Amino acid sequence: MEIPDLGILIKKVDIALTKEMNNFASQYDLTGVQMSIIDFLGRKQNNQATQQEIEREFNIQRSTTTIILQRMERRKLVFRSTDKSDRRKRYVKLQAKAIELFPIVNEYIAKHQKRLIEQFSVEELKTAVKVLNKIRENVNE
């Protein structure tokens, strides 16, 4: 068996998943990343997290996160505030508009996840997770 270029294969899968999520998100005038952030915050206590938690969850740089959150703030999806005791710390909280979208977003993501995993056995999934985590760890070194 000839082994394909794993980097290219992973990139193609990422593009396909991103495109599918963006297509769904567009009907709500969102992007897939915005949808993911709404889902992440919606599952947090008080629908709130720090900007740093968002950066870590999605493995994105501070500058990119700031741009995404500024756009979401302009659209009244999130509200950002600064910690009174530590001005470097910023909190991000869902606003009413995003709270209304959360059940739709969460259901889509859950169904999407179920559809992805139901085509594999438990052993195949364990192997896939192990392989992907190992690749991620080696890339981050």
Image (cartoon, rainbow, N blue to C red):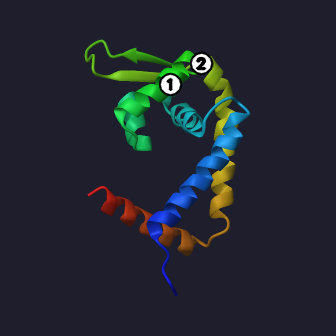
Depth check: give the residue in front, 134 or 16.
16
User: Which structural element holds mark 2?
Assistant: loop
The relative height of residue 23 versus residue 2 in the rendered view (above or below) is above
What is the x, y in percent for residue 11? 51, 58
Residue type, mark 1 in image: Asn
Residue shown at 41% from the left, 26% from the top: 66
Amino acid type at mark 2: Arg
| 131 up-or-down from 88: above or below | below
Label 2, label 1: how many angstroms apart (C-alpha)? 20 Å
| Residue 78 locus on image (x, y percent) | 53, 21
Sooner in the amino-acid sequence: mark 2 or mark 1 = 1
Q: Tell me the element at label 1.
A: helix
Q: Dot 1 surroundings within 10 Å: few (below 14), some, or many (20 or more)?
A: few
In the displayed orientation, state which residue is furthest to the top.
Answer: 84
Where does label 1 land, which residue?
Answer: 46
- Asked if 28 appears above or below 135 in the picture, the reply is above
Residue sitting at x 62%, y 55%: 16
Q: Does residue 109 show up?
A: no
The structure residue drawn at horizontal position 60% and vertical position 39%, both measured from the top left corner, is 32
Q: Which residue is found at the position 64% from the left and 20% from the top?
A: 97
Q: Name the residue under label 2.
A: 75
Numbered tag placed on residue 129 in the rendering: none
